[in-house]
Amino acid sequence: MAEPTKARNPEREAFYAEIGEHSLSPLWEVLHDLVPKSPRTPVLPTLWHYEDVRPFLMRAGSLITAKEAERRVLVLRNPGLGGREAITQTLYAGLQLILPGEIAPAHRHTQSALRFVIEGQGAYTAVNGERTLMNPGDFIITPSWTWHDHGNDSDKPMVWLDGLDVPLVAMLDTGFAETYNAEKQLPSRPEGDALARYGSGLLPVDYKPETKTSPVFNYPYARTREALESLSGAQEIDPWHGIKLRYVSPATGDWAMPTMATFMQLLPKGFSTQPYRSTDAMIYVAVEGEGETRIGDTVFSWKPRDVFVVPGWTTHSHHPAGEAVLFSFSDRPIHDKLDLWREERIKH
Amino acid sequence: MAEPTKARNPEREAFYAEIGEHSLSPLWEVLHDLVPKSPRTPVLPTLWHYEDVRPFLMRAGSLITAKEAERRVLVLRNPGLGGREAITQTLYAGLQLILPGEIAPAHRHTQSALRFVIEGQGAYTAVNGERTLMNPGDFIITPSWTWHDHGNDSDKPMVWLDGLDVPLVAMLDTGFAETYNAEKQLPSRPEGDALARYGSGLLPVDYKPETKTSPVFNYPYARTREALESLSGAQEIDPWHGIKLRYVSPATGDWAMPTMATFMQLLPKGFSTQPYRSTDAMIYVAVEGEGETRIGDTVFSWKPRDVFVVPGWTTHSHHPAGEAVLFSFSDRPIHDKLDLWREERIKH
Amino acid sequence: MAEPTKARNPEREAFYAEIGEHSLSPLWEVLHDLVPKSPRTPVLPTLWHYEDVRPFLMRAGSLITAKEAERRVLVLRNPGLGGREAITQTLYAGLQLILPGEIAPAHRHTQSALRFVIEGQGAYTAVNGERTLMNPGDFIITPSWTWHDHGNDSDKPMVWLDGLDVPLVAMLDTGFAETYNAEKQLPSRPEGDALARYGSGLLPVDYKPETKTSPVFNYPYARTREALESLSGAQEIDPWHGIKLRYVSPATGDWAMPTMATFMQLLPKGFSTQPYRSTDAMIYVAVEGEGETRIGDTVFSWKPRDVFVVPGWTTHSHHPAGEAVLFSFSDRPIHDKLDLWREERIKH
Amino acid sequence: MAEPTKARNPEREAFYAEIGEHSLSPLWEVLHDLVPKSPRTPVLPTLWHYEDVRPFLMRAGSLITAKEAERRVLVLRNPGLGGREAITQTLYAGLQLILPGEIAPAHRHTQSALRFVIEGQGAYTAVNGERTLMNPGDFIITPSWTWHDHGNDSDKPMVWLDGLDVPLVAMLDTGFAETYNAEKQLPSRPEGDALARYGSGLLPVDYKPETKTSPVFNYPYARTREALESLSGAQEIDPWHGIKLRYVSPATGDWAMPTMATFMQLLPKGFSTQPYRSTDAMIYVAVEGEGETRIGDTVFSWKPRDVFVVPGWTTHSHHPAGEAVLFSFSDRPIHDKLDLWREERIKH
C-alpha cells in the first residue's frame, strides 16, 4: 500500500496520549507496518558448522548430566530474533547430546518434535511404548502429547537435531506438559511395529487416524535414500528443487506432522537449483556432499551435518560441489492450512 | 514438568557467554518456560464500554479524514501485550468509523478481516465487485487477498468492529498488500448475489471452492437472529454455551474464515452459563441485553456494543440480566487445524 | 476396443460347455460387451404427462387405502428396463398420493428418499421427530435409516414424486428396513428446527456430521426460487445449463444426499441450452413454464408437473417457450465418488 | 417391514394392466421385495480349486492365443447370478493366462482392475509407461483409464486373478474403452519408479492426487508378508479378523482403488476367527496354508491358489489348519462412500 506520511501535530499527539490510557491507539499511524506490501522478516540467514558446534556440545556433556538437564540441548538461536529461543519465528531447533548410558527421561507436551539424527547410532527414542533405534539421517517424530524418552545404550555420543514448534505453541497459548511417573517407558510393542503396521502400503483394517500426526514415527534414512537413488536416474529434474520429496503420513498423505513440513532432497552432481522463494522459512541440514547456498546476498558453504536457515520469502539457490543430499523443515503446513502459503520460481 | 532449580556456577556462566557468541544457548536453563505445564498467557481480561470509546471515535472523526487515515480505526490494545497492536496474541481488533460521504479506499491484503456492525446503517462494504449494505449485528467478511472498500452513503456515522489476523500473519511472515488503482471498485454484480448464489442451501452446479474462506461475505443479523429465535424455545440449552452457533462456509461446513472462528450465542432469560475454558482467547461483542461475565477473578458488566476479551484457558461464565445475545470470535480454527485446541467444561 | 469376430469351432464350443459346468466361462467371447467403447444404456427417454397420470393416481386412491398400501405410489417404470421397478438403472421414482386424513405409517430403511412436491399443500413429512409442511416445489429428504411418516391434514389430495436409490441398494445388497412401533412419530422438535439450526449460515457450535446426508431435510421452494430470481438478472448464463444450482448439505458443501444429486435450474425467457451429455441419467420435473427437450432424436413437450427421463450419455437440450424452471435428480454422486463421472459440452 | 398380503381382485388387476401400458405400476404389490428387512443376496458361496481350474486354463492356452483373445481369461461365474459374467453383484473375477512370449495388448477402459498373482514369475504389467514384474502374491493395479498391457518374457506360464468392477460400471452406464495404437507401450520410466516415488513414506514435493486410485500400482508380496510377520508376534489378535490389513493409497490413506477394497490377512497357527458378516461380498484367494471356511451352512476346504466367495451379509468364519495367509477383495469402498456399509461381529 502507498505509504504517505501522516501529519503529526500537537492535537493529534495529545489525543493519542489520552486514548492510550483507555487501551486504544490510532491505527493510521502504524497501518503500513501492520499491513506491509510484502513480508519483512526479522529472521537472518544463519549457518552453524557442525565442526564448530560439536566441541561446545561435548563440553556441555561434561558440564551437566542429561538427567540434571532433562534435555541437554544447545539451542540454535537465530540472531535476528532478539534473544528468543527460536531459529525462525515459529520454530525452535537445537542440537541434543546423549552420552553413553544416559537417559533423557520420559515426558510429554503439546509441542510437536522432530529428531534428525546427526551423529552416532544405537540410541533409541521411545514413543508411547515403542522404541526405535536411531541412525544418521533418520527422521523421527515424537508427536504432540505422546510420552517419549531417549536413551543411549551405545558406547559413543549420540547427537541429533531437535525441531519443535515451541514459539508457535507459545503464541497460541496452547502449551501443556507432564512428567512421566518413571524415567523411561517399558516397551509394550516390539521395535518396528509402527512401521510394519502403518508404513508398508497397508493400514490395519479398522484403523482411523485420531490425530493429524503420522502413525509412523521413524522414517529410516536407508529407505529414504533408496527412494532418492531410484529417482535420481529417471525423472526430469525440477530446476528449482532437484529431486525433492516431502515426508507424509501414510494415513492421510498429508504432512507427517500438523505444524512442521519435512523434506529430503537430492541434488545431482553438476546441478544447481534456480532461484526460488516461499513464505516459509526453511531450516536445512546437509546430509551428504558439500556445496554452497546463496540466500539473498549471503553465501554459505556447507558440509555434512551443518545446519543453516533460509528466512521466509528470501530468494535462494543451492550449488552443490557434487551430488548432495539435504534434509529440511519449515512451518509450511501452517501456511497451507491457513491459505497463506506463496512461492515464487524465478526464471532467468 | 517438574521444575528443579539448576545449579548455576561460574564455569557454566562462562560457557553460556562463550556459546552465546555462536548463536547458541543452553536449553536447560529455560526448558520449563518454553514448555510450560499449562498455558501462561500474557493476555489480560479487558473491557471497552462503547459509551466510553464512542466519544474518542467521534473526536478521531474530526482529527483526521478517512481518506488521510486510509482506515480510521481506534485499535483495541490488550494491556497485557506490551504495546503491541493486538487484542489477543494472534488477533487484532479495532473500531472503525466512517462518516457520511466518506470512503475507505480499496486495497487488498493477505490478512483476513471480519467486520461486525456496531452502529449506523446504510454504509456498504464492497468485495470483489459486489457491494453489501451493513446493518447492526451483521457479520461481514473481507477475505484474504480480495479487493475491498467501504463507503458511507447514509447521513449518520457508521461504526463497526474490525477483527483481523494481523499479529498471526506478522509472525508467519506472510503479509502482502496492494492498493487498488481507484478509490472504489465499480460494482460488477448486483447486491445480494453471493448470498443468493451460495447461501440458499444450493451452490452453482460447477462451483468448486478455491479458497478456505466462505463465498458468502455477509451474514445478515436478521437471518441469524431468526435462527436463534427458532431455537430458543426448543432445544435443550447447553449448560456451558446456551444456544451457540458458529458461522460456517456453505461450501464446506467449515469455519467461515480459515484463521478466525465466529459465533453468535443466545442466552435465555434467567440462564447463566457454567464455568468453561478453552485454549483460544475470545473477543466478545454484546449485541442485545445486559449482563455480567466472570473471567477468573474479574467481573465485567456489559451492555450492547461493549467489547471484552476472555484470555485463553481462563475459566469464565456469563450471567445475563435477561435474554442476551453475544457475538464472539477467536483464532480457534488455527488451534483446530494444528491439533492444539482443548476445552474444559467445569461441573459444579 | 477393436471388435474382431472370434472364430467359433466345435472344439471351442465343447470346451465352453465343459467349463460351464465348473462355473467358468470364456471372457474372450464377451469381452467387448463387458467393456464397451462407450456406454450403451438400456434406459429409454420417457415422458409422463401429469395430466395423464393424475387420473390413475386418483383411481388408485379409491382402489386402495394408504394404510393398506403402506405407500400408495404409482411407480414410473422405464420401459427400457424390462419390467424392473426402476426409472433409471440405479434409481426408482414414483408418484405418491395421500388423501385428506390419511397417513403413510412410520418406517425406516437404508434406501435414501427424496420427495418433490407436485400438487397440494398442508401434508407433512416427519423425520426423526420433526415435521415439515410440504408445498409445491419443495425438495424434502427422508435420509437413509431415519424414521419417517407422512400425513395429510389438509382437505385436498397431496401428490409428490418419490425418488429413491432402490435399484442401487438392491445391487449392493445393502437393504435393511424396520417398521415403527406406531403409525406416526410424536413430534420431539418444533417445525423448522432443522432449517434454523443447520440452514441459516451457521451450525451448532459442537456439531459434527455423522452421516453423509444433509441435516436440513426440507429445502423450501420459496427460498430456492428467490435465489434463482436474484441470479436471473445478473450472471452470465451458462450456455449448457442456464442458471443451474445443486442442492447441498450445509454441513459439508457436498450433495444433499450420498446417492442422489438434486438440482434446480432456471431457463430464462428466450434461452435454449446447448447440447450436453453426462454419464448420469437425469430425471426431470417441470416446475414452471413450458417447453421442449430434445433427447437424441426424441422431442418431448412438457408442462408443469410433467416428469421425463434423459438417459445417461445421451445428448440433450432444453428449449423453453418462456421462462421455465426445472427440478432434476440423478445418481451423479456415485459417479463422482467412484471417479466415473464424465460430461461433454457440445459446441456448435 | 410387516408383510401383509394385499388383496388382489379383478378391479385391481384390470387397473394394473391398464396403467402398465403407461409405464406405471403399483408399488404396493412389490414394496416388500423392493425394501427388504435385510439383504437377500442371490450370490452363492462358491469355491474354485485351483487344481481343478488349472487344466482348463492350460487347455484354453492351446485353444486360443492371447492375441486373438485379447485377454485369455476364464471368468469365475457366480452360479447364483444367472449366467451374468460376475462373481458378485458388482464385481467380476477371472483367471488370466499368459504363455511365454505372449502379449496381452495395450488398451484402457474406465473399469478398474486388480491383478493378484497366482502362478509363475517374470511376466510384466505396464501401466502408463512403467513396467512392473509380477511375482506370486503381488497385488497390482491397472487404474481406471490408464493404458496397460501385459507380457510374459519368462519361460513358464503365468497366471493371475483379475478382479474388475465390470458389473458395477455396466449398471452405472459409465463404460468407455480404447485400444492403444501399438501392441505394447514403450517404457518411459524405469521399473520401480512409482514405488520409490510414492511408496517410501514420502511424496514428490508438489504432488497432488488427480484421481482416487493409488499412484503405487504394485504392492509386492515380499513387503506385505514382512509386515504381517512383524505383526504376528506382537499385537493382540482381532478375534474376527486375525491380523488383517487393508491396502491403501499413500496419497490419501484411503482404499487403493475407488471401487474395490483389497486386504491381506494372516491367521496365526491354531487360531480360528469368530463368526462375522458385513454387507460387502468378499472374494478370497488363499495365499499360504490350508484350512476351512464356514459360510452359513457351507464349509469350504481350501489350499493355496484356491478362490472362494463369501456372499454379502452372510456369517462366516475361518479355520486354518496352521498359519495361513488370505488375500481378499470386495466392493466395500462403494458401501462406505454411500453410507451403506454395515458389519456384525458375532459373539459366542
Image: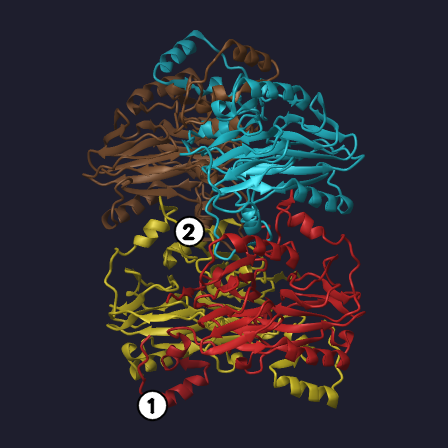
Chain colours: A yellow, B red, C cyan, D brown
Q: CA distance from mark 2 to mark 1?
A: 48 Å
Residue B9 occupies quadrant: bottom left
Asked if residue B221 lies left or right of residue C26, the reply is: right
> Is residue A172 visible from the viewing direction of this image?
yes
Question: SS at mark 2?
Answer: loop
- Classify the position of the C terminus of chain C by image quarter: top right
The residue nearer to you, when weighing B275 against A144, is: B275
State which quarter of the image contains the N terminus of chain C: top right
Which quadrant holds residue D297?
top left
Percent x, y for residue D40? Answer: 39, 25
Q: Amino acid at mark 1?
A: Glu
Q: Chain of mark 2?
A: A
Left-right relation of D283 to D16: left
> Mark 2 or 1, which is nearer the eye?
2
Say which residue appears at 41% left-offset and 68% top-offset. A111
Side of D323 relative to B247 (left or right): left
In the image, C252 versus A3, the foreground residue is: C252
At which x and y percent is residue C209? 48, 48
User: Which mark identifies residue B11?
Assistant: 1
Disc 1 sits on a residue from what chain? B
Give the numbered dot on residue A250: 2
Callout 2 and callout 1 share a chain: no
